[in-house]
């Protein structure tokens, strides 16, 4: 990965920061504190989803939607929904029976803070809430659009998407995977939800099929580039930089882009995918510059 | 609970049996076996949701929908959806960090058979699939109807419904709950999903508000009666009869309808609720006789 960027990184950083705040406000409002016996559940859900993260997925939803003139007031619901879905997957990923990770975003994992039972249920309820947000009229006036979002999120996150990828990842530990196997695994485990995030913006915008496909292609290449960068970071960065345990893949005996290609070639492949992702945005002109800068950002980030 | 029934129990039994078969076929088709790395996940999902259970929730959906002339070919998707949601909750309930139960429907629990990690993910993916089925055109031609189902299922099963109730249940262990607290806990933990099942039939049927409310009232009383009967069974039946561990509530130091009211008064309260549930069905004439018999069945059942 080269160190210089073509698109305005500062403009993207500002945009990411202000969008993260807006997403945070939306998430906060959708998870109001409660007094009853379920107070602890809500606190755990809030702990897992608020106050952290790059909000890459929520940003993608809202930024793509803005290409189609969808006001942020609406797309933020759909952005918050995918952030809830993502947070649920992280809670369950970190459980002792899964990756057994005590650290997430520089803080104790949800099960360390609230116990395993509450963590499992907080993850469950965040998944439910992600679908509930998509069903709200505030997300889009058309029920047809909302049902398309529900369908797309379910396909991206269920047994043939994210969760299926997690299983393939687990079952691949301590055995050698080929490059196509690693590509498929990550396309499912991480790529599908990133691609969905971009696609959700196009669905909200009622994009014509050709533009819809451009957005999906952008999301797909972005997702793979993101994962390669993640593997490189896991192999090269410290836990302090990452805000989570480093060197996990190697310790778990996982086949990664780095173990298969080496760091240099993995970086080159990430560069190639970023360029490809950016080319898919050609039809959108200058309005897509933040999305172009985002493609560069996902591979040049330090955590 | 009296031992004689007013409505035709044999007709209900036949109807339940044939409906369970149709639901099983729908569930089987929606969870096709796979060859890839996610094969094990799909097997665990199939293990948890196929081949067992009374299919009470799926029956309610389809039977209420039939009051509004919705063909079974459509309502079975929505019935299968709630059975998947229910199966996910049972998998997660049985986990070591939760109820730690090795036995379910007379078979090893999913985590005993497939390990904890796969069990967590199979539960996650079944929840996702439950929402995915509701988004399918096969469930109903109208996107508005489908999005109403998504919203209703999310509200019934998330932090303010089933999952919230599970947390209240856990946090209530080893301390005394009052009768209103126990009523609220079960209304959330079990009642909401049973009530949703009846309501889903009315949503599919596009029921007028008054009839919709009758169905909801029926579902609510049925749900509470079901839970009281469950408490009575837990206190009186053997594990062999139940197909799951017996005497769990007492062992966990839980406040139940039985611990609060005693067995005789708990039975009487169940009887009262059954009669009340049946009265809500008055507008539907003879067509609702199976639903009336069902209300009797849920309190006279032996498992």
Image (cartoon, coloured by chain):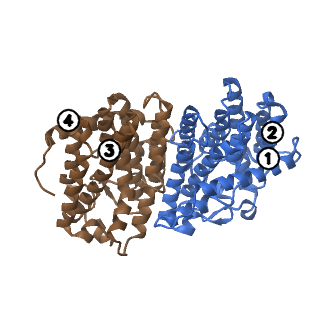
Chain colours: A brown, B blue
Q: Quadrant of residue A67?
A: top left
Q: Chain of mark 4?
A: A
Q: Chain of mark 2?
A: B
Residue B55 is at least partly visible in this image: yes
Q: Which mark is residue B297?
A: 1
Q: Left or right: A87 with respect to B42?
A: left
Check if mark 2 and mark 4 are on a common chain.
Answer: no
Give the SS element for disc 4. helix
Viewer-proximal residue among A66 and A82? A66
Residue lying farthest to the front in this orientation = A210
Earlier along the polypeptide chain: callout 3 or callout 4? 3
Q: Which of pointers 2 and 4 indicates the residue nearer the eye? A: 4
Give the SS element for disc 1. helix
Distance (Cα) linking label 1 and label 3: 56 Å
Q: Residue at x 23, y 58 (%)?
A: A229
How busy is the neighbourhood of tag 4: few (under 14 within 10 Å), some, or many (20 plus)?
few
How busy is the neighbourhood of tag 2: few (under 14 within 10 Å), some, or many (20 plus)?
many
Distance (Cα) linking label 1 and label 4: 66 Å
Place of residue A298 in the rendered image (x, y in percent of width and height, measured from the top left): 23, 51
Q: Which mark is residue A214?
A: 3
Give the SS element for disc 3. helix
Q: Chain of mark 1?
A: B
Q: Which of pointers 2 and 3 indicates the residue nearer the eye? A: 3
Earlier along the polypeptide chain: callout 2 or callout 1? 2
Give the SS element for disc 2. helix
Residue receiving disc 4: A286
Check if mark 3 and mark 4 are on a common chain.
Answer: yes
Check if mark 1 and mark 3 are on a common chain.
Answer: no
Q: Which mark is residue B292?
A: 2
Place of residue B216 in the rendered image (x, y in percent of width and height, measured from the top left): 67, 33
Check if mark 2 and mark 3 are on a common chain.
Answer: no
Q: Quadrant of the N terminus of chain B?
A: top right
């Amino acid at each position: 990965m080269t160190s210089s960027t073509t698109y305005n990184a500062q403009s993207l950083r500002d945009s990411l920061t202000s969008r993260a705040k807006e997403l945070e406000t939306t998430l906060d409002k959708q998870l109001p504190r409660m007094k009853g016996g379920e107070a602890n559940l809500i606190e755990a859900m809030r702990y897992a989803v608020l106050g952290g993260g790059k909000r890459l997925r929520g940003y993608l939803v809202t930024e793509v939607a803005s290409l189609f003139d969808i006001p942020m007031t609406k797309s933020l619901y759909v952005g918050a929904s995918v952030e809830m879905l993502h947070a649920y997957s992280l809670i369950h990923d970190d459980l002792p029976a899964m990756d057994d990770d005590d650290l997430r975003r520089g803080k104790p994992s949800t099960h360390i803070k609230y116990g395993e039972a509450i963590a499992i249920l907080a993850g469950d309820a965040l998944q439910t809430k992600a679908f509930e947000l998509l069903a709200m009229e505030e997300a889009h006036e058309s029920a047809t659009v909302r049902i398309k979002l529900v369908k797309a999120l379910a396909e991206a996150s269920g047994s043939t998407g994210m969760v299926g990828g997690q299983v393939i990842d687990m079952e691949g530990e301590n055995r050698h995977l080929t490059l196509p196997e690693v590509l498929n695994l990550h396309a499912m485990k991480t790529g599908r939800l990133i691609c969905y995030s971009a696609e959700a913006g196009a669905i909200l915008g009622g994009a014509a099929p050709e533009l819809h496909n451009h957005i999906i292609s952008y999301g797909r290449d972005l997702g793979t580039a993101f994962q390669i960068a993640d593997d490189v970071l896991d192999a090269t960065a410290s836990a302090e930089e990452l805000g989570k345990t480093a060197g996990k893949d190697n310790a778990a005996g996982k086949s990664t882009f780095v173990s298969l290609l080496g760091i240099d070639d993995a970086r080159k492949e990430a560069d190639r995918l970023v360029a490809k992702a950016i080319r898919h945005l050609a039809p959108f002109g200058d309005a897509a510059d933040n999305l172009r800068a985002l493609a560069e950002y996902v591979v040049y980030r330090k955590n």
